[in-house]
Image (cartoon, grey):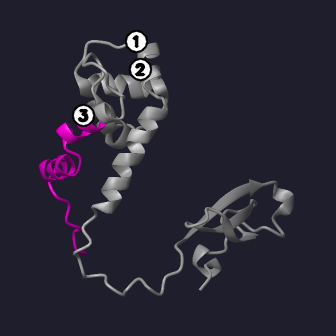
Amino acid sequence: MDDVYSPPDSVVVDRIQRAFPSDELRERARATNLIERERKFDIVALFYTLTFGFAAGSDRSLQAFLDRYVEMADCDELSYAAFHDWFEPGFVALLREILDDAIENLDTGRTDLNGRLERFRDVLIADATIVSMYQDAADVYAATGKDQAELKLHLTESLSTGLPTRFRTTDGTTHERSQLPT
């Protein structure tokens, strides 16, 4: 089996820093009046914490975000109230501006996929979930185990709309592949 190439962390960090330069982030924050004076607020640390260092964790509370920010900003401490005050419409506007520019500046010079994706209208996400049931339902909803009953919910969702396009229930032994729309 071929190994998938995974660049070293230093390469990834370098690419991110080139895509979102610290000086540019600070300049944008000043332009949107998000930063009035330099104190404990570090827009660069806040941006990187929010976009790269927070979403992957299992604890996604504001307190966990604050703890991660304090760690990334290398500050002693920060009150929850002061931290919470940063989440205002100006910060949302700054994030939207950064995202809009990042999308606009994507490398459009690559031609390796030109024309290959034109036939695709949507991306579909398929999922199957097993629901354990009482043994009495085993004659209708057979399970993989003995003396068990399982219902399997097959759901196909449209990525573009976020809505289900198809759902079906079967017994627990039905393979997901047989339920995929083609």
In the rendered image, which quarter contains the C terminus?
bottom right
Element at label 3: helix
Q: Tell me where the magenta segment starts and ends, as one range.
A: 1-28
Q: Return the mark for residue 26.
A: 3
Element at label 2: helix
Image position, residue 14 (x, y; %): 14, 49
Element at label 1: loop
Total numbered circles: 3
Front position among marks 2 and 3: 3
Residue at image mark 1: 79
Which badge, 3 or 1, is on the more N-terminal residue? 3
Category of crowding for the residue at label 2, using alpha-carbon neighbours closer than 10 angstroms: few (below 14), some (14–19), many (at least 20): some
Image position, residue 51 (x, y; %): 35, 42
Q: Are marks 1 and 2 in contact (CB under 8 Å)?
A: yes
Tell me: 109 left or right of 67. left
Image position, residue 168 (x, y; %): 74, 71
Image position, residue 109 (x, y; %): 22, 75
Q: Amino acid at mark 1?
A: Ser
Measured in 3D between alpha carbons, the distance from the residue under mark 1 to the one under mark 2, in whole angstroms, is 6 Å
Q: Nearer the viewer, residue 170 or 62?
A: 62
In this picture, is 85 found above or below 146? above
For the point 25% across and 75% down, the residue is 1
Q: Amino acid at mark 3?
A: Arg
Which badge, 2 or 3, is on the more N-terminal residue? 3
Residue at image mark 2: 83
Q: Amino acid at mark 2?
A: Phe
In this picture, is 167 found above or below 26? below
Q: Nearer the viewer, residue 9 or 162?
A: 162
Main SS category, magenta section: helix
Measured in 3D between alpha carbons, the distance from the residue under mark 2 to the one under mark 3, in whole angstroms, is 17 Å
